Amino acid sequence: MTGLSILRQAYSLMEQPGRLTAQDGNESGLLAVNQIYGELWQREHTTPFEPLEHLRQELQLSWRCMPAMTYGTAALLCLNSGEERPYDRYLELYMRAAAHTGGAPQRRRDVLPGEEVV
């Protein structure tokens, strides 16, 4: 599945399919897809995450992550547009779907210059 497919599904959930054709839709959509993609990547991979460069790229996640990708992307798009009520609903759906991805979230390390905090 591609990032564009996820974005289309997210806009369909939000009942805004025409928003994909907006001039900034691709840039903000790519940012939202990459944010959720990075979070779910940590659940399935041990290699460093590389964000999508464009929406037509294939996501390297299992089928278990696809519902979470859609709900999480919809939540971020709602947050960006200032729609709080749908954001809460999509965030809850994202959290539920992410819990069923099969892998536990891996801890990320915060690294400050000269110090490492785990």
Image (spheres, grey):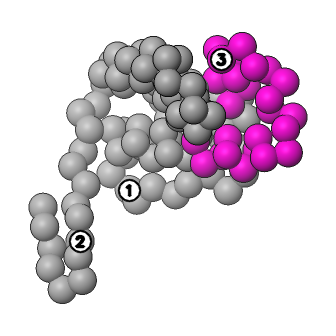
* Corner quadrant of residue 78: top right
Q: Nearer the viewer, mark 1 or mark 2?
A: 2
Magenta stretch: give its range.
7-32
Name the amino acid type tagged 3: Met
Tell how many labels: 3
Q: Which residue is mark 1?
A: 47
Q: Residue furthest bottom?
A: 114
Mark 1 Cα shell of 10 Å, populated few (<14), some (14-19), many (≥20): few
Give the spatial CA distance, label 2 vs label 3.
37 Å
Mark 2 residue element: strand
Who's the residue at 12% across and 61% down the image? 118
* Corner quadrant of residue 6: top right
Mark 2 Cα shell of 10 Å, populated few (<14), some (14-19), many (≥20): few
Quadrant containing the N terminus is: top right
Q: Main secondary structure of the magenta part?
A: helix
- Whichever of labels 3 and 1 marks the residue nearer the N terminus, that label is 3
Q: Which residue is mark 3?
A: 14
Name the amino acid type tagged 2: Val
Name the amino acid type tagged 1: Thr
Which disc number belongs to residue 19?
none
Q: Which residue is mark 2?
A: 111
| Residue 102 left/right relative to 114 | right
Who's the residue at 67% across and 56% down the image? 53
Estimate the x, y position of residue 59 in percent, counting from the top left: 59, 39
* Corner quadrant of residue 21: top right
**Residue 36 is one of the magenta-drawn residues:** no
Estimate the x, y position of residue 49 in percent, counting from the top left: 45, 55
